[in-house]
Image (cartoon, coloured by chain):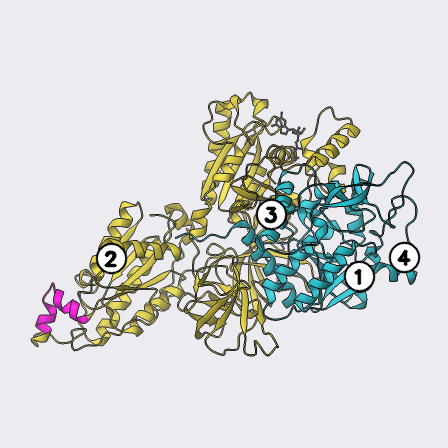
Amino acid sequence: MTRELSYLRLLEAEAIFVMREVAAELERPVLLFSGGKDSIVLLRLAEKAFRPARFPFPLMHVDTGHNFPEVIEFRDRRVEELGERLIVASVQDSIDAGRVNEETGPGASRNRLQTTTLLDAIAEHRFDAAFGGARRDEERARAKERVFSFRDEHGQWEPKAQRPELWNLYNGRVRPGEHVRVFPISNWTELDVWRYIAAEELEVPSIYFAHRRQVIERDGMLLADSEFVAQRPGEEPFETSVRYRTVGDLAVTGGVRSEAATLPEVVAEIAATRVTERGETRADDRVSEAAMEDRKRVGYF
Amino acid sequence: MNSDGNIDNPLDAPAELLRVATAGSVDDGKSTLIGRLLHDSKAIHDDQLEAVERTSRERGDGRFDLALLTDGLRAEREQGITIDVAYRFFATARRSFILADTPGHVRYTRNMVTGASSADVAVVLIDARNGVLEQSKRHAFLAATLRVPHLVACVNKMDLVDWDQERFEEIAAEFRAFAARLGAPDVAAVPVSALHGDNVVEGSANASWYDGPPLLRLLEDVDLEADRRALGPLRLPVQWVVRPHDDEHHDYRGYAGQLTGGVLRQGDEIEVLPGGARTRVASIDSFDGPVDEAWPPMSVIVRLDDDLDVSRGDSFCHPGTAPRVLSTIDATVCWLDERPARPGARYLVKHTTRTARAELAAIVSRTDVEDLSLLPSPPELALNDIGRVTLQLASPLLVDSYAENRTTGSFILIDEDTNATVGAGMVAEPPPPDDTPHSPNVVWQRGSVGREERWLALGQRGGTVWFTGLPASGKSTIAQALEARLVAAGRSAYVLDGDNLRHGLNGDLGFDAAARAENVRRAGEAARILTDAGTLALVALVSPYAADRDAVRARHAEGHLPFFEVFVDTSLDECENRDPKGLYKRARAGELSGMTGIDDPYEPPANAEMVLVGGRQLEQTLDDLVAALEETGLLPGRT
Ligand SMILES: Nc1nc2c(ncn2[C@@H]2O[C@H](COP(=O)(O)OP(=O)(O)O)[C@@H](O)[C@H]2O)c(=O)[nH]1
């Protein structure tokens, strides 16, 4: 007799295991929830790991203030449905407190500033573990990321000093002030995430489906026309049908031309795409070869 | 990600996941091969290709360098080498692949060990011009040490040796011979040119003499089923206790964990270790509702019939198949830290969901990974060294040998000062049974060949299947038919029949309780020897007393030998009806005393692995038996 698990269920079982390990071995975990598809999957995995009990950790959103209103509305509704606690750490507060300075000029965004807000919030709440929805398929530096990613007291990532991860034995030991970032869906691809959302019939914010929107075309990306995107000379907003592959700071997150309005259509499009998620939709990663590696070193998600 | 529409309906994800680790020495072409694999299986996106083209141009390379697709960290790009393990993902219509790309240099042995620890397949790159070098042997050795079940020698740069068939076969034969010495169970070899794409994803006209599949097909065809069938005994380490503090679930108490061996069913009797308390599984819960059974690697929540004190670090098993509870562990360790390991040093041992303090009591030997020679009692294990050690634990752990279970047989060592993960350990096979001889002058002769080695060479594992039941219940018939079927399928099986044993080994014994106990003990010892030798011992013996049978079971557990008890549950009436030897008749007539079932009790087993009821077709009974033996790992896959 053969007993099988589909590979998605296998990835699911592995992620549930990781979440329970963190709950058991660390004192004050937190789950980073942005309202984006990856963190939506994390919430479902947390339900699978801990229900019928409540999650043994709160949720936290690092809010850039540059939001799609649909996403914030969804975020609050989902938290309410789950009956869990949400902490909002705001980049605006960090700016007001003088912890960071707003970027100016063309291409300005709050993506980089999030790092300080995140680290401040981790310190303030004395979190020693933070779940994130990052995946190894996203980018070359991420491919070397551990599932338990150790951060020193400055929140920094040192690629050469990562702890070896063997079998399913994770070492999450930290000293006060240090923390681990934990990525339960490290081994999932973007397509896996969508397939899982479809299989679990998870709700996602409406911006993931094709909708008509005023956009500006910049460097081959379609940025939402909003108060956060300063128009450059020669740029003319126009309306078209777009869908988003990631949610992030509105100012640097591009949509893709799409007519995919249902989950199966989106999955079909993702399966057929010729461009990576980050390449298509994240202006900030295009800056340099090692952009992501550099940001990660200083404590980015 | 498959983008060619090979998957008709994108919601029909490929069913299987294969974890692959690759190793090769610098310049063998590993990065090129992986780039080729990803590129030709369409896992590379246009923007990634553009980035590689851009970099290739900037560097002034004449051609598009596939290797650039995989070098992730800046230091790696600068030095043009792989340092850390990188994970890649691609899929075909049949399987999804997680590829751990590990560096091959001896300085990064620890990273290869990391990548291989959970791999199903290890791909070892060999440069066709250089042949099987010491480093290729080292890679094969590490894969075998980590017990990666499948090994592939990828003979690259065949274009540079003019696709010389003889050259390939010479390399393949040498590699196979070496792998066989290591006990690697499944070895394949494929001739490729990563640079030109021959035999990577597509076949090659250049190698018309090669009739095997290209590398990707080979990976798609690796037989995971056989690996999966050998689930072994139940292992479920408790990770987390689920206790909702609300009114609706007032009394809910669930034990969450991931199965790492065996099959758990609702209603099963289980033992909670290390305490040993027994209870039954009230339900197996999941977020999607209760399930009837669970198997590895499912993450589940178990509720128990009884209110026991169970917490993280405890473990569930079926009665009689418990792991060893050890305070001293012999293990093979790969050292991962700059600071060497020295005898007397203290570490934390993290094993499944339990962590214990330990002292490194001794370093028994170190393996020279270049030539595989053994150095006894080295003063230390330095970074990347592999050696045999003894650990003295402050509190016991529930372990299997790594050969039996890659999860319950593995651990990591943590340095409490730095919190670094400093060592990776694999629990050694248990020493031969600790027979306490009557004469103090008799000492156990330790053979030079280990049991696992012997079993591997035979291609099968030993085990005892113990048939108990009333006289004439059908034990011998079933055991003999099973023996015939197994032997016909090429397996070694041997029936130890109670009646036959009484003609020789047990010829001096009568039928009183003491003699019966001794009869059972001797049969049990004979079965242990056969089992240790790698045979399936099929014991057909009335063995009426539970205590005697349990003693045999315990002896097997002690020696870490599989024991599978089958209760042939034919009613007394039926047995008496059959009465082939006329024993019942004689007993009823008072000509025979001490007849089991008539004037001597039969104590049916409460925890037999299997109960066979009468009145069924023999073939059907055998099918069920074989299926159950496969399930527990006593038989591998189809017979
Ligand atoms: N002729 C030929 N050259 C190859 C082949 N595979 C790799 N190479 C070359 O060998 C060199 C080393 O390859 P690379 O993939 O960087 O090796 P790695 O160090 O193992 O990752 C590069 O110049 C490749 O172009 C092959 O199949 N045939």
The picture quadrant where one finds residue B104 is: top right
Residue at the spot x=55%, y=64% of the render? Answer: B287
Q: Are marks 1 and 2 in contact (CB under 8 Å)?
A: no
Q: Earlier in the sequence, mark 4 or mark 1?
A: 4
Amino acid at the residue labelled 2:
Ala
Name the residue carrying label 1. A153
Name the residue carrying label 3. B115
SS type, badge 1: loop
Residue A100, numbered label: 4
Tell me what hue chain B is rendered in: yellow
Magenta stretch encompasses residue B439 = no
Magenta stretch encompasses residue B574 = yes
Cα separation, mark 4 vs mark 3, equals 40 Å
Range covered by the magenta-colored residues:
B572-587
Which one is closest to the eye, mark 4 or mark 1? 4
Amino acid at the residue labelled 1:
Glu
Q: Which chain is cyan?
A: A
Q: Between residue B167 and residue B89, name the one nearer to us.
A: B89
Amino acid at the residue labelled 3:
Gly
Question: In screen coordinates, is B72 left or right of A214?
Answer: left
Question: In screen coordinates, is A202 left or right of B172?
Answer: right
Say yes or no: labels 4 and 3 on the same chain.
Answer: no
Cα separation, mark 2 vs mark 4, equals 78 Å
Cα separation, mark 3 vs mark 2, equals 44 Å
